[in-house]
Amino acid sequence: MSAPIVLLSLISVALSSNVLDLTASNFDEVVNGDKSVFVEFFAPWCGHCKALAPEYEIVADAYVKESNVVIAKVDCTVEKDLASRFGVTGYPTLKFFKKGKTEPEAYNSGRTADDIVSFINRESGARGFIKKPASAVVQLDSSNFDSIALDSTKDVLVEFYAPWCGHCKKLAPVYEEVGKTFKSDKNCVVAKVDADSEKELGGRFGVSGFPTIKFFPKDNKEGEAYNSGRSQEDFITYLNARCGLKRVAGGGLTDDAGRIEALDALAAKFMGAEDKSAVMEETVAASADMAKEAQYYHKVMKKVIEKGSDFISTETSRLSRMLEGSMSDEKKDQFTVRKNILGAFASSADGHTEL
């Protein structure tokens, strides 16, 4: 890459940052008591500073529309006098200059963007806000808890958390993936409550530590303690069992989703029968009171009678191609179940029976 292009890239990065660079020439002009100023004293070579950098950019972005808060930084390898003036002996050193003051207080709390923004909002009265991607986990509070968690048509898993809780922060990305896995299941809900803010809800359900996870099944809205593991797979296994589902991580379905053992046996019988029509009639009768997926068994049988056994492989290939494309979650589930059911016929056509 040529020198001019590198220079332009660096300028672009610099211009895109909302963190203000403080130097000896502008420090006292900015930190003059007119505004609240949060300052990072850093060194470019410092590993912890590099780790903080992306979080610090998020903090600065949270206050773009706040005229009374400044997020700034000082390069102590260049501004040695400023570092000395404020007693900086390690990096990064974070200090908060509250509006009306020019002497700082040390910031010694967490170093995530959420931690720092919470502190600044509390100390300055500002309303910094971190823009986050839409969550697959339903956020509950006093206004919607009863209508969702206590809905007798829904099974609901609820995490009672606190924003400052280390274990909650560790669980957050795992729990988000669990939410994504079940987001298309309207009656199996993955939800959370900020019990630090919603203290009444926490007290109502006996929450004394964080995170506390409770399951509210359709038939018990008192709530049951969740005591299983906290890996993504643990949660998925638990919810599949309690909600009667067959999800895999990411939201797909297992290979046997939609399959019905009794009808699988009839599919095998059908593929080996000389009088296929008789077996189809038997299947229609057997599936009368079963789930709607059962209807696809006799639909396949009808197509095989009309088009021959090759329909199984042809239709399986067609569905596989369609599943590679873009479609709604509902359609993806529907086509996956059909492909799974076709598998019951395919194994029999090949002369094998699935165990």
Image (spheres, rainbow, N blue to C red):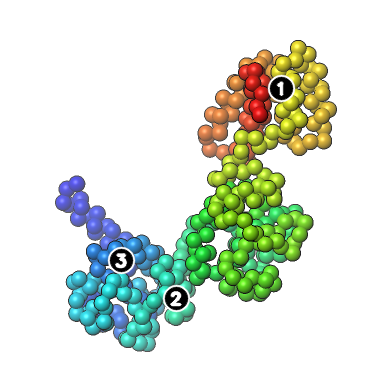
Residue type, numbered disc 1: Ala
Q: For the residue carrying disc 2, how many other residues have a C-alpha within 10 Å: few (<14), some (14-19), or many (20+)? A: some
**Marker disc for residue 119:** 2
Q: Mark 1 or mark 2, which is nearer the start of the sequence? A: 2
Q: Nearer the viewer, mark 2 or mark 1?
A: 1
Observer-nearest residue: 49 or 300? 49
SS at circle 3: helix
Observer-nearest residue: 13 or 314? 314
- Which quadrant would the C terminus be assigned to in this image? top right
Residue at x-position 65% and y-position 35%: 256
Q: Mark 2 or mark 3, which is nearer the start of the sequence? A: 3
Circles 3, 2 touching at the beta carbon (< 8 Å): no
Give the percent coordinates (x, y) of residue 19: 32, 68
Q: For the residue carrying disc 3, how many other residues have a C-alpha within 10 Å: few (<14), some (14-19), or many (20+)? A: some
Observer able to see residue 295: no
Circles 2, 1 touching at the beta carbon (< 8 Å): no
Mark 2–mark 1 distance (CA, rounded to whole Å) = 65 Å
Residue type, numbered disc 2: Phe
**Marker disc for residue 49:** 3
Residue at x-position 31% and y-position 74%: 93
Residue at x-position 24% and y-position 57%: 10
SS at circle 2: helix
Q: Nearer the viewer, mark 3 or mark 2?
A: 3
Image-quadrant location for residue 67: bottom left
Give the percent coordinates (x, y) of residue 280: 78, 21
Mark 1 sits on what residue?
268
Q: Mark 1 or mark 3, which is nearer the start of the sequence? A: 3
